[in-house]
Image: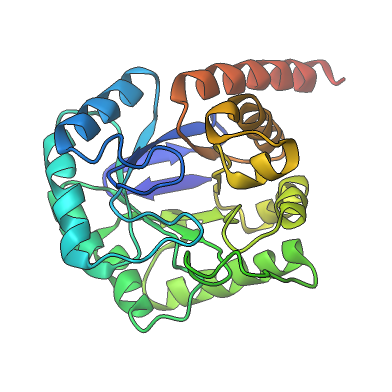
Amino acid sequence: MLFRARHFEFRFPRPALVMGVVNVTPDSFSDGGKFLDAKAAVAHALELAAQGADLLDIGGESTRPGARPVSAREELRRVMPVLEALAGRVGVPLSIDTRKPAVARAALQAGASIVNDVAAAGRRGDADAMWRLVAESGAGYVVMHAQGTPRTMQKRPAYADVVREVGKFFQERLKRLNACGVAADQVVLDAGLGFGKTLGHNLQLLAGLGRFTRWKRPLLMGVSRKSFIGNLLGAQVEERLPASLACAVLAVASGAHLLRVHDVRETVQAVRMAEAVLAQKKSSGV
């Protein structure tokens, strides 16, 4: 299985890719305000790369539950200095975490290789514009499921069968992306844990992750420090690393190919250890 993002290519099976989070925002749930200054964000990104990040995901608009949208102009003001400073300085792909085609286009022009689109599930008039941009640029594209918008998504989310419905969404989006010229090998699937899901929905998606391998596309899981961990364990954001690592290891064992995380060094260690044990188990037929 191939994932292609402009001039970057990743062939699976291979060790899981770790995507480091760089939030250039004042209000992200985990690290809002810490890296709003461009120099601080660049330094943080370089440190994540040094810790072993295979990709860097840069975002200028918070998508935490209840977050208010920002204008494309403000989003560009936040992310462009960071992207421009990192382009050419790191040897890993840069991902732009955005819902706006205008921001995606500017980021790709500045050197980004992936568009991480948390609004891929929404009813939006500019969806085709985003997808045609991805097609013409050859960028990688993360298609993420969400129910509602960040401002409304946690207001009584409901599903008859969350795993089946997310799977149906993936199937429908792959068809629409193909119609817009996006090749299958450009696409990564993200079930959107925490985006319009209850604690129960998130646990069901983690437990049912293997059902999404049928599309033979890489699966991305973003579980790092998320609120459902706090809801289950009563842990504050800064106390959620052990549970985040447990989810990451379980996700890889179930077929995840990419992990979007805040804690890169710790995740790399945990996942590589798990992969070594899983490889031994496979080779010995246990």
Where residue 105 sits, quadrant-wise, is bottom left
> In the displayed structure, would residue 243 be above or below residue 180?
above
- Side of 75 relative to 12 (left or right): left
Residue farthest to the right, as pictured: 286
Q: Quick one: quadrant of the C terminus?
A: top right
Residue drawn at the location 38% of the way across and 54% of the way down: 62
Residue 270 position (above or below residue 176): above
- The number of discs equals 0
Q: Is residue 276 left or right of residue 11?
A: right
- Identify which residue is drawn at 16% across, 59% down: 106
Relative to 217, is 51 above or below?
above
Q: Residue at x 31, y 64 (%)?
A: 134
How is colour applied across the structure in the image? rainbow
Q: Position of residue 121 (x, y in %)?
A: 51, 71
Task: Classify 244 as above or below 274.
Answer: below
Viewer-nearest residue: 177 or 95? 95
Left/right placement of residue 154 relative to residue 185 reads right
Q: Can you give x and y, in whole percent of width and height, for residue 44 in the image? A: 28, 27
Return the residue nearer the eye: 53 or 45. Answer: 45
The answer to whether any part of residue 87 appears in the image is: no
Q: 118 or 112: which is nearer to us? A: 118
Q: Is residue 82 visible?
A: yes
The percent coordinates of residue 224 (x first, y second) are: 54, 37
Q: Position of residue 212 (x, y in %)?
A: 68, 55
The residue lying at 15 percent from left, 64 percent from top is 73
| Depth check, front residue: 167 or 192 | 192
